[in-house]
Image (spheres, rainbow, N blue to C red):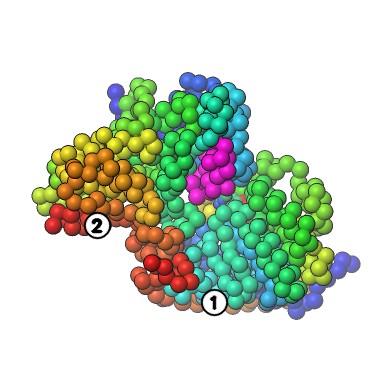
Amino acid sequence: MTRTMTIKQALNEALKEEFRRDETVIIMGCDVGVRGNPFGITLGLYDEFGPERVRDTPISEAAIVGACLGAAATGSRPIGEILFSDWITIGMDQLVNQIAKIRYMFGGKINVPLVIRAPVGAGGGQAAQHSQSFEAWFSHVPGLQVVMPITPYDVKGLLKTAIRSNDPVLFFEHKRGYEIRGEVPEEDYTIPFGEAVVRREGADVTIVAISIMVHKALAAAESLNQMGIKCEVIDPRTIYPFDYDTVLQSLDKTHRLIVTHESNRRSGIGAEIVSQVVERGFDLLDDHPVIVAGLDVPMPYNRQLEAMVIPSEEKIKNAVLKLMD
Amino acid sequence: MTKQADPKLLVDRYRLMWVIRLHEEALKVLFTQGKIGGTTHLYIGQEAIAAGVIAQLREDDYIVSTHRGHGHMLAKGGELRPMLAEILGKFTGYCKGKGGSMHIASLEVGNLGANGIVSGGLPISVGSGLSAKMRGTDQVTVVSFSDGATNEGNTHEAMNLAALWKLPVIFLFENNHYAVSTEVSRSMAGGMKNRAAAYHIPIQQVDGNDFEAVHFAAEEAIDYVRSGSGPYLLECETYRIEGHYYGDPMVYRSKEEVDAWRKKGPICRLEQALVERGILREAECREIEAEVRKEVEDAVAYAENSPEPPIESIFEDVFTEEGA
Ligand SMILES: Cc1ncc(C[n+]2csc(CCOP(=O)(O)OP(=O)(O)O)c2C)c(N)n1
Ligand SMILES: [Mg+2]
């Protein structure tokens, strides 16, 4: 049996089911308890599982992230929440110097089964300190897994995998994606990390789209289809590990690559994906790869400017048309 | 009889409190009309603190503000027109429409910036205090923060450093009881008195809804800091009357609690004192309110009629000179 639900509901369900399945799972963060998180992701958890396992914290990101590490090393499966990923910077030492490295530095003697959930993304008119997506930063750090799903089915299955993983996971939800609807089975399921999904098949151009850009790429593909151009849209779902095989298989057919992400372009994840593809599959390409990403400026508050900084369906379309020219 | 402030000053600050209040009321309307993006954090109920402390500063003093910073800016000499224009994202705004409600700054009025990062301003105040001291001026920096910010490392590091280096910084703790849904007793261990004592910073705790109490405490704090004695901590107890942001459903507290505090609001209390002392008549109070309302309406119209930023401005202001 499947039902239709929003990403928000699917996340909430995944949390509740994992809390019921494993009593070592706990969550902590600002306003996750009584308030159920300002986006409603943790609604009902406090009532069902109580204040011990569903912990409202002070605004102390370094302590939230670090406490997840300490708890994870000693028998809990903590989920830390940073309501906007922009503020993860305050917990950065714990993430980058501690969480990512502890297992390796200590010769594999300590496991760190934790998840940091941190909503990302722009588009809400919230300016420079509330709009960022840091997937490139974290995938640069050996020792961290980075997950960025954007359908209800995927967020549920991947959040469960993240919670059950014995290694640290950064789980990036897109703020503008919470109301996206889709089908979710009733039965328990998980999705392995490192498996991309082909969201739409096509023989002319491969578009690798990250997070919310999947939906913009699909819209662009639909409108290009009416002009006779067939785009293949790939959603990698996890940034590290990354499924290059699916991309290369697609390029074997299309020979043209576009990568699109919302975060700004410079040193972004698109650059890494392109460089890996070129190294692994140079001969598959008929043309140079193209990256459609955010402009390299802090996010401006003004909504018209913001809309120009964020990559749009239109920009993807234009990039495809230029490639096909 | 308790100490009383100069009647002229009281009327001036009473008016300022209305400016802050009605500015925020105007934002509610604009927000409801969908003319403001993002989130808007209102200063309603905390007006006596900005009017009592920040309005008491010199023009060349500095403030470092927060996400709930509109009142700070207006009290430091910020004007309604560029304020509202900024919040509407217009080119005539204080930051050319790039910053918005949470990022208003202006060196001309000595505001080093509101901040979207809770506690983000505290370390900055250490730097402006340091620079004032090193330049040999007697400029003071007031850095505002609320209960939620007290538990960030930033706050502790800043207090320690300001105390260690005897910097001219007033830590203005606007204890409005809430950080989003979290009541201060559920977030803060120890209390500010103990924390100030730990860093050897003198502290005064006052009723932040009592304008005169705030005003006199601020005078003392400013004198102390300006004379080079080091930082000072001023805790003003108040209440966040509105939701965390405009539109917050407030499931975490009762209507009775909010109503009880509403009755203790700073504007009605100062108004009562003014009338009782014969400084203003009730009708004069209403005149002031109406006058300010007109000023705010004018500024709203100005902001609404202002141009959007030009598209080219997207790439401007990243660096002093454009790179490659
Ligand atoms: C570092 C950081 N963590 C979390 C947030 C989200 N946030 C914004 S305001 C706020 C509550 C702040 O409470 P407080 O410091 O008491 O200020 P008040 O809202 O009462 O003015 C939170 C949690 C943020 N902006 N920055
Ligand atoms: Mg507060």
**Subunit ID for the residue under disc 2:** A
Residue range highlighted in magenta: A79-99
**x 18%, y 51%: residue:** A287
Quadrant for the C terminus of chain B in the image:
bottom left
Three-letter residue code for mark 1:
Lys
Give the class, few, some or many, for how many residues have Cα within 10 Å of label 2's Cα (few <14, many ≥20): some
Does the segment drawn in magenta span residue A95? yes
State the image coordinates of residue B52 (x, y, percent, origin top left). Answer: 72, 67
Which kind of residue does numbered mark 2 sit on? Glu
Between residues B118 and B40, which one lies in front from this camera angle?
B118
In which quarter of the view is residue A91 placed?
top right
Q: In the displayed image of the protein, which residue is found farthest to the right?
A: B1
Residue at mark 2:
A314
- Of tags 2 and 1, the one toward the viewer is 2
* SS under mark 1: helix
Name which quarter of the figure residue A35 lies in: top right
Q: As drawn, is B115 to the left or to the right of A142?
A: right
Q: Measuring 57% from the left and 47% from the top, which residue is drawn there?
A: A90
Q: Are marks 2 and 1 on the same chain?
A: no
Q: Which residue is mark 1?
A: B294
* A206 to the left or right of A271: left
Query: What's the chain of the residue with tag 1?
Result: B
- Residue A136 % position (x, y): 41, 46
Q: Is residue B293 above or below residue A216?
A: below
Q: Position of residue B267 (x, y in %)?
A: 68, 65
| Residue found at x 81% / y 68% | B228
| Residue A16 image offset from top left, x and y in percent | 47, 27
**Element at badge 2?**
helix
Quarter of the figure that contains the N terminus of chain B: bottom right
- In this view of the protein, can residue B44 be seen by the observer? no
Does residue A123 belong to the magenta stretch?
A: no
**Near-viewer residue (B287 or A24):** A24
